[in-house]
Image (spheres, rainbow, N blue to C red):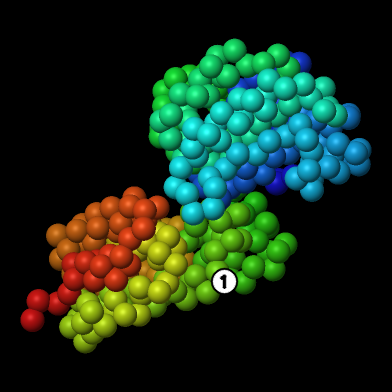
């Protein structure tokens, strides 16, 4: 049990009182799926506690409980499809095998496409008696309103800095302060990201500075970045651009950034005008928005680095 979820867990009603459709939301990387998974185990557990000892708990922890169905995007797909949603509907109307109820969990409900969402509406409206549908979402605004309105929402919070650092230190993650700052306190994301992420962020600032100073071309910088994990690199770039704007407008970067960033950001900010900084910020946000689709990474980076290129 993640320490920052204990209160929410303890506050959950007994299964008999629990709504049949729940939507777990909150920022990415804070453990929402883990929470929903644990609840699915609790709902099939012989003692209704997720005891971890009974047969149901053993099966569930191995992902083998016949009364729990987990739905997520299939490998290489960007959406949860209508066929998957229909399979879920069929699963929920069947009689439980071992437990007294069945539980379906949709791990990234943001990715339900329109027809999949529509297929789920009837199940959400009249859930088969005694069965539960758990949805997990980083951005519930992307769900269609009729889905949102039929679920009871449970908002899970980020860990506090202390809780997040405790989590990362327990797992011996190096440079936990920087990792937690770069993931905005999303401790599970910090755990999942490569250990060299803080160094990557520093390298990105250095390359932006070199391009802005005219000692490196946008093309050369692109060569160095097109092979790097795009999600992570763009997330770092959004942070860098946001903090550059903050440095210029407010005189200091946001305090939550890793130690040692302030001086680097000041140097970089001095090389750019505010228009460039905002275009970089917009460009990074836009690229991140599109990053789920297959992109030509060279093109993405070339465009971004060109925004800060020194005008010689
Ligand atoms: Zn159990």
> Residue 145, percent across and down?
41, 23
Residue 30 seen in this snapshot: yes
| Label 1: which secondary element | loop
Q: Quadrant of the N terminus?
A: top right
Q: Tell me: 230 left or right of 45.
A: left
Q: Nearer the viewer, residue 303 or 4?
A: 303
For the point 86% across and 44% down, the residue is 58
Residue at the bottom extreme, as displayed:
215
> Residue 133, percent across and down?
63, 27
Q: Nearer the viewer, residue 160 or 24?
A: 24
> Residue 100, percent across and down?
82, 22
Q: Quadrant of the C terminus?
A: bottom left
Residue 240 seen in this snapshot: no
Question: Badge 1, how many Cα within 10 Å: few under 14, some, many 20+?
Answer: some
For the point 70% across and 14% down, the residue is 129
Q: Nearer the viewer, residue 248 or 229?
A: 229
Residue at the left extreme, as displayed:
312
> Residue under circle 1?
195
Say above or below: 187 vs 129.
below
Q: Tell me: 17 left or right of 296.
A: right
Say above or below: 310 vs 166.
below
**Quadrant of res 17:** top right
Q: Tell me: 266 left or right of 256.
A: left
> Residue 27, percent across and down?
50, 44
For the point 85% across and 29% down, the residue is 98
**Quadrant of res 239:** bottom left
Q: Tell me: 183 left or right of 69.
A: left
């Amino acid at each position: 049990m993640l320490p920052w979820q204990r209160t929410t867990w303890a506050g959950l009603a007994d299964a008999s009182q629990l709504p049949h459709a729940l939507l777990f939301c909150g920022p990415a990387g804070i453990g929402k799926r883990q929470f929903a998974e644990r609840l699915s185990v609790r709902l099939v557990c012989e003692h209704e506690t997720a005891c971890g000892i009974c047969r149901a708990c053993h099966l569930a922890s191995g992902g083998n409980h016949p009364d729990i169905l987990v739905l997520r995007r299939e490998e290489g797909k960007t959406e949860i499809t209508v066929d998957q949603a229909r399979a879920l509907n069929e699963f929920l109307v069947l009689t439980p095998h071992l437990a007294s109820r069945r539980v379906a969990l949709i791990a990234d409900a943001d990715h339900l496409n329109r027809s999949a969402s529509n297929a789920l509406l009837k199940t959400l409206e009249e859930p088969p008696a005694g069965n539960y549908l758990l949805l997990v979402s980083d951005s519930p605004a992307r769900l269609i309103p009729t889905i949102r309105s039929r679920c009871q929402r449970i908002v899970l919070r980020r860990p506090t800095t202390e809780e997040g650092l405790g989590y990362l230190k327990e797992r011996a993650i190096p440079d936990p302060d920087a990792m937690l700052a770069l993931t905005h306190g999303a401790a599970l994301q910090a755990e999942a990201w490569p250990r060299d992420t803080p160094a990557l962020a520093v390298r990105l600032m250095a390359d932006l500075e070199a391009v802005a100073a005219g000692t490196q071309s946008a093309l050369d910088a692109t060569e160095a970045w097109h092979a790097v994990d795009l999600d992570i690199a763009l997330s770092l770039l959004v942070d860098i651009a946001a903090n550059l704007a903050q440095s210029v407008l407010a005189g200091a970067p946001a305090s939550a950034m890793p130690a040692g960033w302030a001086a680097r950001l000041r140097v970089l900010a001095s090389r750019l005008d505010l228009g460039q900084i905002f275009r970089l910020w917009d460009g990074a946000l836009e690229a991140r928005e599109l990053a789920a689709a297959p992109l030509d990474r060279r093109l993405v980076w070339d465009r971004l680095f060109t925004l800060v290129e020194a005008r010689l």
